[in-house]
Image: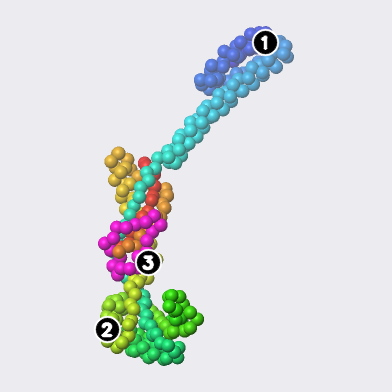
Amino acid sequence: MRVILRRNPQALAREMNGFLGFLLRREPPRIKVRWGSTKRGCIVESLKVLRSTQVIILGVCIAFATIVSTVILSKGLLQIKKFSHEVIEVTGSAEKKINSDYIVWNSSFSIRAAQLKDSYEQLQKDLRTVIAYFKAKGIKDDEIVVSQVNTEIIYKKNEKGNPTNDIEDYLLTQNIEIKSYDVTKVDALARQATELINQDIALISQAPQYFYTKLGELKVEMLSMATENAKQRAITMAKATGNKIGLMRSAKMGVFQITPANSYNISWYGQNDTSSFEKKVQAVVTASFAIQ
């Protein structure tokens, strides 16, 4: 398009404003200007109109970009909020029965005599008899722990039953502890040790203590099983409502319960039973999963 500027500046401005619609809707036509006898002020006015048009176009672009950015950012924030709040929290558990692989058994016997020397000599004699009996039952030297002798002085009592300063007897007690990985052998010995009564030794047998030495490895296995159980529970719950679970968001280990095999007693701080050979180990894990 070719325009000859022969009008006053006001008329030229009106014509330039008319071209604004073209500038916003399609590529504007090129304007060639041929100067006639108009004044120099017409040139300045025309440049102002063109500059205003460019500013308007730039403003429209900036506004459009701002709107698009806001929409994208809002969508991202909504996704983050959904990811943060839409979770399902479940508790998984695992249970396994084990047999103890280590045993500790304590026993003791005592000698009472008026003379300390006589008490000690008789105690040593009985100790040799007891050790020989244990070895005959298959107990090894490195499995036997002989503790120090416990000495108690027994004072005479007066006619009112109150103790005096006169020594009546000495009571010497010998404790013996057996630690072994052969649980069956020591367990049987603990029940048979009363046979020493036939040799005038009143052996006092305490209840054996049963332990599981691979508890560290077992805990790792049980935690894995409990976590898998929690996942399966979450899948079942989400499926019932037409949803699916995503990644695991968090997991918290609960307390371990080590109880007798047929016991259902648990405590909030956990249990570690040592009274039974057969044990039941329970692990609990609380986990949360994202909902898709």
Element under disc 3: helix
Could you say where residue 196 lies in the image, as x and y percent from the top left?
29, 85
Residue in the image at 56% along x and 17% along y: 20
Quarter of the image with the C terminus in it: top left
Could you say where residue 179 lies in the image, as x and y percent from the top left?
37, 78
Above or below for 229 versus 61:
below
Residue furthest to the right in view is 40
- Tell me where residue 276 sits by quadrant: bottom left
Where does label 2 land, which residue?
195
Quarter of the image with the N terminus in it: top right
What's the mark number on residue 215? 3
Q: Nearer the viewer, residue 108 or 39?
A: 108
Q: Which amino acid, mark 2?
A: Glu
Cα separation, mark 2 vs mark 1, equals 131 Å
Q: Residues within 10 Å of mark 2 (few under 14, many from 20)?
A: some
Q: Which amino acid, mark 1?
A: Pro
What's the mark number on residue 9? 1
